[in-house]
Image (spheres, grey):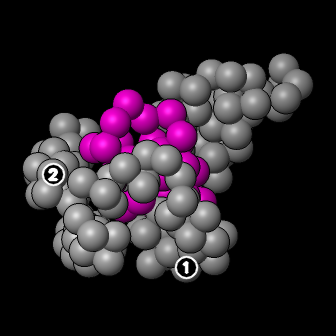
Amino acid sequence: MGFFKGLKNLTKTAMGDSSAMIEQGEWMLKNNQIDAAMNCFSGACLKGEPEGCKMWGIMLIDHGTGPIDTLAGLLKLKKAVALGSKQAEIKYKEYENHSSVTHLFNNKNQIDTHRLAVMSNPYKSLDPLEQDLLDKLVIEIKEKGTLYGN
């Protein structure tokens, strides 16, 4: 990103332009600024941008620190799907075999604890759509865990 384009994009991001937030996040991700990229994507997601939700979900799963981040990442992907992102649906299916997701699905006894942690998100309480999606996701995990013999 050139200096002036970067400055213009930074200004748009600061003004709350969600597509600029996503573009800024992608640039930061390419430049290995993981935390800053995640902040850009989360800001876009909080504004209801499906691409922001998808990217935030991917970041939480790929760079998160445990099952709570993984569950939150899956929730963000589900939200992006609900908002109309076909790419998020594809990514969600791809992540079903990701090691952290498999671990989450194999530990269904802990899922209610992880659910409570996701619900107590300190940055923003879950909106009604996310609440409904989280409930469905927990049921899905419990059912799949049963299929795996857990």
The secondary element bearing badge 2 is classed as helix
Q: Which residue is mark 2?
A: 110
Image quadrant of residue 146?
bottom left
Q: Which residue is mark 1?
A: 84
Identify which residue is drawn at 43% across, 35% down.
64
Q: Give coordinates of residue 23: x percent, y percent.
A: 70, 43
Q: Is residue 45 visible?
A: no
Report the residue that reaches farthest toward the front. 149
Q: Amino acid at mark 2?
A: Gln
Q: Examine the structure image and report whether residue 114 is included in the region drawn in magenta.
A: no
Identify which residue is drawn at 84% across, 20% down.
3
The correct choice, above or below, for 32 with respect to 93 in the image is: above
Give the CA distance from mark 2 to mark 1: 30 Å
Q: Give coordinates of residue 114: x percent, y percent.
A: 18, 49
Q: Is residue 2 left or right of residue 15?
A: right
The correct choice, above or below, for 128 with respect to 120 in the image is: below
The crowd level at tag 1 (other Cα within 10 Å; few <14, some 14-19, many 20+) is some
Magenta stretch bounds:
47-75
Give the main secondary structure of the magenta stretch: helix
Q: Is residue 87 left or right of residue 44?
A: right
The crowd level at tag 2 (other Cα within 10 Å; few <14, some 14-19, many 20+) is few
